[in-house]
Image: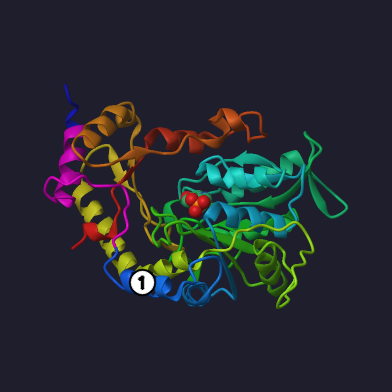
């Protein structure tokens, strides 16, 4: 006994994805450019490991794409976040404000620094942190002492805010910056999903003191595994490079390390792949923006469901497309997910909210996480690979 609305949703999705009998993944890369040429060239050079000519080139290409002054390519997005938080001064015992609606890496990076994630709610407009709600919340629970922000309940210092540009949609960065300035908090952007996404005409990552990008295989540009630290701050750029290169003091033959650093730099072989895949980014975004249009047309007039589109201040890469089910239909979400996956169309619900994970359920949270909780019931991700558009 299938609900009529569910049948309509399946028909609409299949009208956009009429691609024969192949399994349709949520997001998969396609390599039809210089990927073989550059990786072969890298192998021929024998310089496959940490740092090398392709790493330099990848970093410089990323500067052009993002408009940021410093780019440090690292082994993955989680490592990038770890270092971002460390270099803005997050210390053991601090709290960092993190959306409960995110992938676990955001919270893990806080924990790697010995700090505690403090979970906050999201907004329907961006699917990311809600600046007004955050402002009101901090007014309530925090106090300023010696120019620093403290959680009145736990007594711990609140050092930073770590918003996520969820599925490629930028949060309202200007409003968040105002909150950060009011409470003397460092803004770090988790831009793992937002390469190629803009806020008010400027690439995401330009508002925080530092930002992290991911080049995992499912992201819009991939290096196999990889990430980058982005910043416009000269000192932080240098420090990020130093810390991720085992904090080795520059010298032609002597090995001196002036603090405990990390072996986090991206290998050259990964950067070679990244250089080629990055060349395809403009075309990928074009196609992904066409795909969301096709979805919008297909779902026009279908009851109980809406295609999420970018907020007016943003231009999104549409990394993962989002369907929002209304209250009635969200009761049947699981049967919809079962039916579509059985038909070879990969769809999935939101990540389990961070405050609901057993590993994080004793962390401080906003009392009201109702938007994130509601989204976790009614949001599903649908196939979003650029090559779904011919
Ligand atoms: C992918 C992702 C990360 C982590 O990136 P990895 O390269 O997989 O370590 C962090 N935050 C968010 C929001 C992500 O989607």
The image position of residue 90, as x and y in percent, is 73, 52
Viewport quadrant of the N terminus: top left
From the viewer's perspective, is 95 left or right of 225? right
Q: Is residue 10 magenta?
A: yes
Viewport quadrant of the C terminus: bottom left
**Residue at the top extreme, as displayed:** 1
Residue at point 28% right, 47% down?
25
- Does residue 275 show up? no
Between 228 and 54, the residue placed more toward the observer is 54
| Residue carrying label 1 | 40
- Does residue 223 show up? yes
For residue 386, what is the image quadrant?
bottom left
**Residue at the right extreme, as displayed:** 146
For residue 329, what is the image quadrant?
top left
Mark 1, secondary structure of its residue: helix
Residue at point 67% right, 34% down?
364
Between 270 and 369, the residue placed more toward the observer is 270
From the viewer's perspective, is 26 left or right of 70? left
Give the total number of marks visible in the rendering.
1
Residue 385 drawn above or below residue 242: above
Residue at point 42% right, 52% down?
167
From the viewer's perspective, is 187 left or right of 1? right
Extent of the magenta region? 6-30
């Amino acid at each position: 006994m299938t609900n009529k609305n569910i049948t309509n949703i399946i028909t609409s999705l299949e009208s956009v994805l009429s691609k024969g009998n192949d399994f349709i993944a949520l997001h998969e890369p396609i390599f039809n450019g210089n990927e073989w040429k550059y990786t072969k060239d890298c192998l021929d050079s024998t310089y496959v490991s940490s740092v090398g000519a392709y790493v330099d080139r990848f970093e410089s290409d990323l500067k052009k794409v993002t408009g940021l002054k410093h780019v440090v390519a690292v082994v993955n997005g989680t490592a990038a976040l770890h270092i971002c938080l460390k270099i803005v001064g997050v210390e053991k015992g601090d709290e960092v404000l993190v959306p409960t609606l995110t992938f676990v890496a955001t919270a893990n990076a806080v924990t790697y620094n010995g700090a505690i994630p403090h979970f906050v709610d999201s907004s329907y407009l961006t699917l990311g942190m809600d600046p007004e709600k955050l402002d009101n919340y901090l007014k309530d629970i925090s106090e300023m002492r010696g120019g620093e922000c403290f959680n009145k309940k736990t007594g711990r210092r609140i050092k930073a805010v770590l918003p996520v540009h969820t599925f490629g949609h930028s949060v309202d960065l200007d409003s968040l910056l105002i909150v950060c300035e009011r409470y003397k908090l460092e803004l770090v952007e988790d831009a793992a999903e937002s390469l190629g996404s803009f806020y008010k005409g400027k690439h995401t990552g330009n508002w925080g003191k530092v930002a992290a990008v991911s080049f995992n295989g499912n992201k819009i540009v991939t290096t196999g595994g990889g990430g980058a630290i982005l910043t416009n701050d000269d000192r932080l750029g240098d420090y990020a490079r130093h810390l991720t290169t085992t904090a080795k003091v520059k010298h032609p033959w002597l090995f001196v390390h002036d603090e405990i650093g990390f072996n986090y730099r991206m290998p050259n072989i990964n950067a070679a792949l990244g250089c080629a895949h990055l060349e395809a980014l403009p075309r990928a975004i074009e196609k992904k923006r066409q795909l969301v249009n096709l979805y919008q047309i297909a779902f026009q007039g279908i009851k109980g469901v809406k295609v999420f589109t970018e907020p007016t201040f943003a231009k999104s890469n549409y990394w993962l497309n989002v369907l929002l089910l209304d209250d009635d239909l969200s009761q049947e979400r699981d049967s919809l997910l079962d039916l579509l996956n059985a038909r070879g169309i990969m769809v999935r619900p939101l990540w389990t909210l961070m405050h609901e994970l057993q590993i994080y359920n004793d962390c401080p949270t906003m009392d009201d996480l109702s938007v994130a909780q509601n989204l976790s019931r009614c949001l599903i991700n649908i196939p979003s690979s650029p090559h779904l558009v011919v």
